[in-house]
Image (tube, coloured by chain):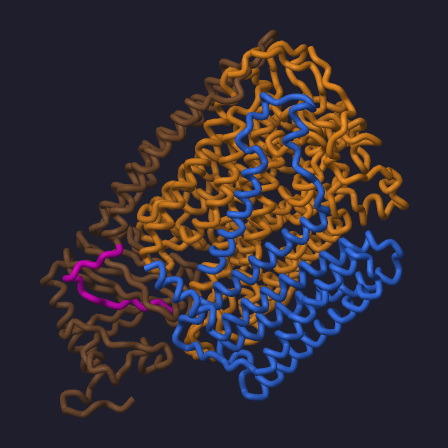
Amino acid sequence: MGSILFFLSILAILATWWLSRQGLASKPWLEQGETAVLPGLPVQSTHPATIGLRVLLAVIGSFFALFISAYVMRMQLPDWRTLPLPPILWLNTAMLALSSIALHGATVAVRRGERTELKASLIAAGIAALAFLSGQLVAWQQLVGEGYRLTANPANDFFYILTGAHGLHLLGGLVALARTTEKVWRVPATEQLLLPVELCATYWHFLLILWLVLLSIWTGWAGEFVDICRQLLT
Amino acid sequence: MAVALILVLVAVGSVVFHLVSPWWWTPIASNWRYIDDTIIITFWITGAVFVAVILFMAYCVYRFRHQEGRQAHYEPENKRLEWWLTIVTGVGVAAMLTPGLFVWQRFITVPDDATDIEIFGQQWQWSFRLPGPDGQLATTDTRLISPDNPLGLNRDDPKSQDDMVIEGGELHLPVNKPVKALLRSPDVLHDFYVPEFRAKMDLVPGQISYIWFTPTRTGTFEILCAELCGVGHPQMRGKVIVQEESEYQAWLQEQASKSFAHLTPGIRNGTVMPD
Amino acid sequence: MVDVPLGSTGVVAAPDVEDVELYHPHSWVTKYVFSQDAKIIAIQYAFVALSVGLVALVLSWLMRLQLGFPGVFTFIDANAYYQFITMHGMMMVVYVLTALFLGGFGNYLIPLMIGARDMVFPYVNMLSFWIYLLAVLILVASFFAPGGPTGAGWTLYPPQAITSGTPGGQDWGIIMMLVSLMVFIIGFTMGGLNYVVTVLQARARGMTLMRMPLTVWGIFTASFMALLAFPALFVGAVMMLFDRALGTSFFMPAIVEMGQPLDRNGGSPLLFQHLFWFFGHPEVYIVALPAFGIVSDLISTHARRNIFGYRMMVWALLAIGALSFVVWAHHMYVSGMNPYFGFFFATTTLIIAIPTAIKVYNWILTLWRGDIHLTIPMLFALAFIVTFVNGGLTGLFLGNVVVDVPLSDTMFVVAHFHMVMGVAPILVIFGAIYHWYPKVTGRMLNDGLGKLHFWVTFLGAYAIFFPMHYLGLMGIPRRYHDIADMAFVPPSAHTLNAFITIMALIVGAIQLVFVFNLFWSLRHGREAGGNPWRATTLEWQTPETPPPHGNWGRHLPVVYRWAYDYSVPGADQDFIAQNQPWPTRTSGAGHG
């Protein structure tokens, strides 16, 4: 359960940092009236949807961290046979990275008010994400073709489930992205586009990082990294 | 008034119930008296806290019940009092935890002179395996289980030749000899539980767990399964019979001749029986 | 007295919903069925959860009948018995308690108590309820599926849960259970996001975190924990569903079942237990923390005294919430896991007792020198303390690893968790319903019926579960549908079992009085007015009762003080509402 505890400790540190600025040590019965109120008020500049997305990412992160925990625990049992990674995964990684970069470009464009570039980057991001998803399906087909079927070995099961879960999350993101793109054509005021574009970009960056984490586990880099850390500590 | 009285009755009634209850643990038959002692310590500490909290509450309800003209005292907090209560609680918790951890250390440290035996639970019966004269149990594999080989012994392992299998029968143990029981299940979770021994541990398919104890009293005790294992769960019973050394040896002789003849008829002729 | 100037410029806390037009529903359907008003959603949640609760109550009757009078009711065979206990447990823990506290009370109270108009994502909130209802329907449908519902015990431990020796294991029961749980978790995540973000973002002007009532703190912390803990159940459910439906081997080692080898290999049943309890232990506190919060407010309001040690109460809530994620394996001391884990988990488990004890002390110290009105909510709060302290203390037995060895998987455990997370939170739910019913409906619940309901429920439930500990101490295992032929069990234990069953029937039956009261008082209850308990918190200060969609009319409340200004020296009343700018205390007037 190491990875989920690691993930939760990061959340705990963030939460502690945030709470430490909320005046949890203040004595509320001594402060009264508005004069005492205003300095303590949290600044509400962030839109609720942004906070909502961050909390959702924490939930999704916890979901995958738990899956990775289960993966690591299951991996230590003797019947584990690591499966070879299809090379197409590297192309897919590049596609997902491109998609993420394009969405970053979209946030820059929407801040500058450049609608043509905004449209172009949103569509590019969508196409790259679709390319990633089809690439994943190809990877599945290749693996099945080589005999790495579901149920043959838990390593295969985890690969299919984790890529599937990641893909489903991206698919959900694509729905949001499609709605945002449609909005760009419909809504004339660029300020109203800032929020949805930024939300999409955050979600995409998160899914890219998540994908890189998964990839590093399958390639064994994560394991080596943990070993090095352990050696440094002991 | 009535409310306070009922609260007092609940507290006092609970204590009285505890003292006069005919429902208490079975007379112990193993070395785990330490566990009983830790439970007693815990009963004393928690019982005192329970009574103190409820009586205090009852007093408050009586003393500070609403009456014409009463005004509550305004006091947001009292740091000193709160810290004192925290420290006292911490001490009480430590007083329960520390002996608990020491006993746990004993519980998981098997003495060197313990005899290995195997307890094998399947839906829904108990089987046992004794190591025989060589004192060692052979390796096993769930995939070897068959009607001829109900426990899945590895017959290629030379240690298997004198292993004594008791299928669905009674486990005999000599009194005052520590036993390390290796627990194994071929199907679902079970739990080896003899109330008089206090000890208990799950049998997990795919791995071997263990438990150790020393029977300290002769007699026949019931083995229960304490982990839900399907519809036959309550019927999954066995017997452990703790005997004096001499009686145990006699039983062992009798079994050895039976089981040796049954399991490995070819051995005496120097041939290995084909399975 | 100093008047605080109103209308000075500042940051506006609540999202700017000036367009009250938004809150005029277009039809009966959007007002009462597909409503986006958190209060209606709360009532929908509560109604469904209480209905599920009644089903689960009947299931508990059936299994108690078997235990108390074995063999008399022949239709309760082993199969049925295990199906009843499984469904009873899962329904009560997840579909009743979690849904009622977070979906019911969370939805109703969060926006009102923090001075918001609604949840921040009303549409998602509505979806949350309908998905919850879908989960309930799937669960209930499993009763009618071939083979009936699963009988794997609410812990659903594999391999047993998906093998043929268990009811529903090779039929539809376990599949429907897992799917229902997954649907529930998706629905809950939608609701949970709302509760958390609403507390973070939609607080009224002046409502700092430390001015929030503890109810909001409790629900907020619990929602956050649930968001992070439920994924563990989801992951476990997905993997078990694969094991069951597709033949993977996540949790399935090589198995010979009834003489037949199964085509599985190498999996680990303990892996599921880790995942399950990584959810399951926080779940206990997900139910407990809202109860802690609500009971704090009930005691404070009805004892006319500020909650004692408010800061400690908040810190303790947060500490319990954080610690509850590192104690999960105390459910697994005898599971065959690495025995050295026992040292760590026993220590963390007993440490968690300290913040919990602080909360108990502060509740009873709030009573000290109070002005205690023995109203029905107060009675339920007192009963909560009795049962919670009792159940919490027996938790110290089970958390202390070696003491757990003889007691785990016995009736002692059943008695313990029913006392601490069954009876105690349900008493809070009752107290809370008696407390907030006047706000929801505008009328008081009938007092006489309430007292009858209270005394029978409290004393009856205590009489059920307190003696049950001693059956476990004796060594009677849990989940035995028949204990008739155990050598060490004296005949008196069977008498005790029969007594417990009779008490269970009585306590269950008296809930009908409560249900009757809920409906009867809707029309015939005494008119309550806006603030019948003379409470300080914002939900009692709404311009209309029951509050309409949007809660506050045109102007959002501004918060001038914390939630517990009761019996302030020098004030002309024994409470000062949170949105009341005066009277200010003259300096030095007795804060200790």
Q: Colour of chain A?
A: blue
* Name of the residue lying farthest toward the top: B69
**Magenta-drawn segment:** B108-122
Q: How many marks?
A: 0
Which residue is nearer to you in this view: C443 or A14? A14
Q: How far across and how far down the image is residue A175, in percent?
A: 76, 65
Q: Give how far across and how far down residue C537 sits, in percent.
A: 67, 27
Q: Residue at x 23, y 52 (%)?
A: B106
Q: Is C52 situated above or below B189?
A: above
Q: Is residue C325 magenta?
A: no
Q: Colour of chain C?
A: orange
Question: Would residue B17 be found to the left or right of residue A204 on screen?
Answer: left
Give the camera-side residue of A53 and A40.
A40
Instruction: Identify whether C463 is placed above or below B36.
Output: above
Quadrant of the rendered structure where residue B18 is?
Answer: top left
Name the residue located 36 percent from the left edge and 42 percent from the top edge.
C397
Provide residue C64's location: percent of width, then percent of height: 51, 47
**Residue C75 appears in the picture as rendered:** no
Left or right of residue B21, residue C257 in this image? right
Residue A102 shows in this picture: yes
Residue depicted at 32% across the width and 38% down the height:
B94
- Give the colour chain B carries in the figure: brown
Q: Please check the rendered image and state whether residue B110 is part of the magenta-colored stretch, yes or no.
A: yes
| Figure check: C249 above or below B193 | below
Residue C137 location, quadrant: bottom right
Task: Decide which of C269, B217 is in the foreground and name it.
Answer: C269
* Residue occupying the far left of the picture: B246
Figure quadrant of the C terminus of chain B:
bottom left
Residue B246 point in image, percent of width and height? 9, 63
Residue at image coords 14%, 62%: B113
